Image (tube, helix red, strand yellow):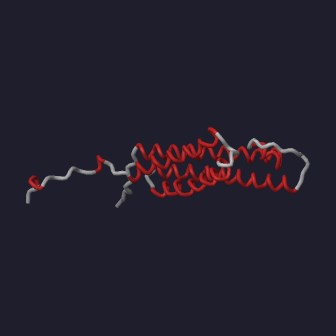
Amino acid sequence: MATFEMRPTVGRLARAGAVFFALWGVLHAVVGLTGTLGYLRGGPSGVLTAFGGAVASTQPNAELALAGHVALDFSMGLAIFGALAIWAAVMIWRGQHMGFWLGAVILGAVDAAFILALVLPGYVTGVDAASGPVLYVLGVVFSAAGLFGRRVHDTAPMARASEVRP
């Protein structure tokens, strides 16, 4: 006998949240791949200039090599977090709560680190500073409302005591 697995109904709010998480993922994957390609094209100074940094010396030295490799690690990690966000978005789209928790907790930690390390000191400003955190907040709010909010159409109105027949 065939059994059918009931998939939860996923509303528009949850799907909108999934789209915001997916956009967060694409943004971070693109930025991460940009840094990685900068390294592949220009070495340690290439990855730094890909993010708008100016390298005073093109002569190889230990500090430049270390900074370039740290930036390369950052870039690859950012691309991986972008892929994680897209995976979480697919899970949310399918109504899986784990997608929400992956997005809310892990991507929230990534954005918090970004804000503390790059935005607050003023290295990243304007739209570049706001786009990721705004997409994150919208993803969390819409996904939470869609996945965990009370759905009015799912609940039947309560019958009054005078309407109940024994």
In the picture, measured across the screen, residue 21 lies left or right of residue 9, that is right
In the picture, measured across the screen, residue 123 lies left or right of residue 66, that is left
Residue 116, horizontal then vertical, whole percent: 64, 53
**Quadrant of res 34:** top right
Residue 61, horizontal then vertical, whole percent: 89, 54
In the picture, measured across the screen, residue 42 lies left or right of residue 30, that is right
Residue lying furthest right = 59
Residue 158, horizontal then vertical, whole percent: 19, 52
What residue is rendered at 64% in x and 51% in y? Answer: 114
In what quadrant of the picture does the C terminus appear? bottom left
In what quadrant of the picture does the N terminus appear? bottom left
166 in relation to 33, above or below: below
Q: How many marks?
A: 0
Residue 85, horizontal then vertical, whole percent: 57, 51
What residue is rendered at 37% in x and 56% in y? Answer: 4
Nearer the observer, 105 or 81: 105
What residue is rendered at 37% in x and 55% in y? Answer: 6
Residue lying furthest front = 121
108 in relation to 122, above or below: below
